[in-house]
Image: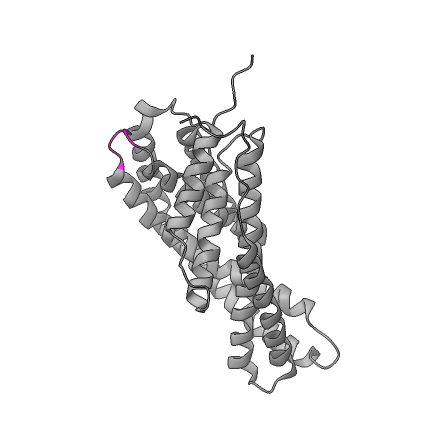
């Protein structure tokens, strides 16, 4: 009988580090939306692997290197996030442009385009400042973890760790916008942790997909929220575009809250449950 597929957290971390190096190179050459998105996503995936490793016992000492890497990754992610948000906001405005919002849409897209140019320059500066230091830090981290390179996790254990971590780190209330935003970010990290499982691990992949769905509904609401606030600041509360964006934000918030009320990641089947 073939062995059951297992997750390999440290090997996955090593792969993500390689992808990050490529993403940084692409962004420095031409920080268009796709390279920026790849950079931001890859930093999140590395963070997810470090979170997973923090849940596992008996690993070689690596906390110092991990914390330093997380600090540097956060700098890159913030800079890339500024650019990504502006790209998304300009696309959302375009989607909501109509005859009575056209002038406001052009005005706001122009302002955001100017901000994007500055954010792009800031991103390049951040990469120039931190790339070499981050590369050395990640190299030291992988070297510290090398004795446990062959570490593997059954999908059932990975799924249990992911769901338990999400439960512990999810705010109990979903009324406050900051908490709603925090739930979305936690779901995103949980998704990336669960995606450590091989493609053939069906339940783990279903769990990842359920977290991705929650992340996306929360992300859609948050993107409209930020854009509506920006439009109000630039165009005023009475602007037809501002009013359109606020309506869309309320609709997305209702969808997200309904999703939260019904959210339940798939449970393992009888065959997949670990034996006591």
Q: In terms of secondary structure, what is the magenta stretch mainly?
A: loop
Locate residue 61: give its quadrant: top left
Q: Quadrant of the C terminus?
A: top left
Q: Residue at position x 29%, y 34% from top? A: 140
- Is any part of residue 125 visible from this angle? yes
Q: Residue at position x 60%, y 79% from top? A: 242
Q: Is residue 184 above or below residue 103?
A: above
Residue found farthest to the right = 99
Q: Magenta stretch containing residue 195, yes or no?
A: no
Q: Is residue 113 left or right of residue 148?
A: right
Q: Nearer the viewer, residue 172 or 90?
A: 172
- How far across and down, in percent of the image, does residue 16 sit? 46, 37
Q: Nearer the viewer, residue 32 or 248?
A: 248
Locate residue 113: give its quadrant: bottom right
In the image, the segment drawn in magenta is: 57-62
Residue found farthest to the bottom = 238
- How far across and down, in percent of the image, does residue 179 sit? 42, 63
Q: Residue at position x 32%, y 38% from top? A: 136
Q: Quadrant of the N terminus?
A: top right
Q: Is residue 89 left or right of residue 164?
A: right
Q: Magenta stretch containing residue 60, yes or no?
A: yes
Q: Is residue 72 left or right of residue 61?
A: right
Q: Residue at position x 44%, y 46% from top? A: 43
Q: Is residue 232 above or below residue 255?
A: below
Q: Is residue 124 above or below residue 116?
A: above
- How far across and down, in percent of the image, does residue 237 sit? 56, 85
């Amino acid at each position: 009988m073939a062995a059951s597929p297992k997750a390999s957290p440290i090997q996955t971390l090593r792969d993500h580090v390689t992808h990050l190096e490529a993403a940084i190179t692409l962004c420095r050459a031409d920080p268009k939306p796709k390279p920026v998105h790849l950079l931001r996503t890859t930093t999140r995936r590395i963070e997810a692997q470090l979170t997973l490793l923090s849940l596992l016992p008996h690993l070689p000492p690596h906390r110092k290197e991990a914390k330093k890497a997380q600090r540097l990754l956060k700098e890159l992610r913030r800079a890339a996030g500024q650019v990504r948000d502006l790209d998304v906001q300009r696309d959302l405005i375009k989607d909501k442009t109509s005859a009575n919002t056209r002038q406001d849409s052009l005005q706001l897209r122009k302002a955001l385009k100017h901000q994007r140019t500055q954010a792009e320059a800031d991103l390049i500066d951040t990469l120039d400042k931190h790339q070499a230091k981050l590369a050395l830090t990640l190299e030291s981290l992988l070297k510290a973890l090398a004795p446990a390179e062959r570490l593997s996790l059954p999908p059932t254990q990975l799924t249990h760790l992911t769901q338990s971590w999400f439960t512990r780190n999810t705010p109990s209330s979903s009324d406050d916008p900051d908490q709603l935003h925090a739930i979305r970010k936690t779901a995103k990290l949980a998704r990336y942790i669960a995606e450590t499982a091989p493609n053939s691990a069906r339940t783990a992949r279903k769990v990842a997909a359920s977290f991705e769905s929650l992340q996306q509904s929360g992300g859609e609401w948050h993107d409209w929220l930020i854009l509506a606030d920006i439009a109000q600041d630039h165009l005023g509360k009475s602007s037809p575009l501002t009013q359109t964006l606020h309506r869309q934000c309320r609709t997305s918030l209702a969808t997200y809250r309904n999703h939260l009320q019904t959210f339940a990641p798939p449970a393992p089947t009888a065959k997949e449950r670990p034996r006591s």
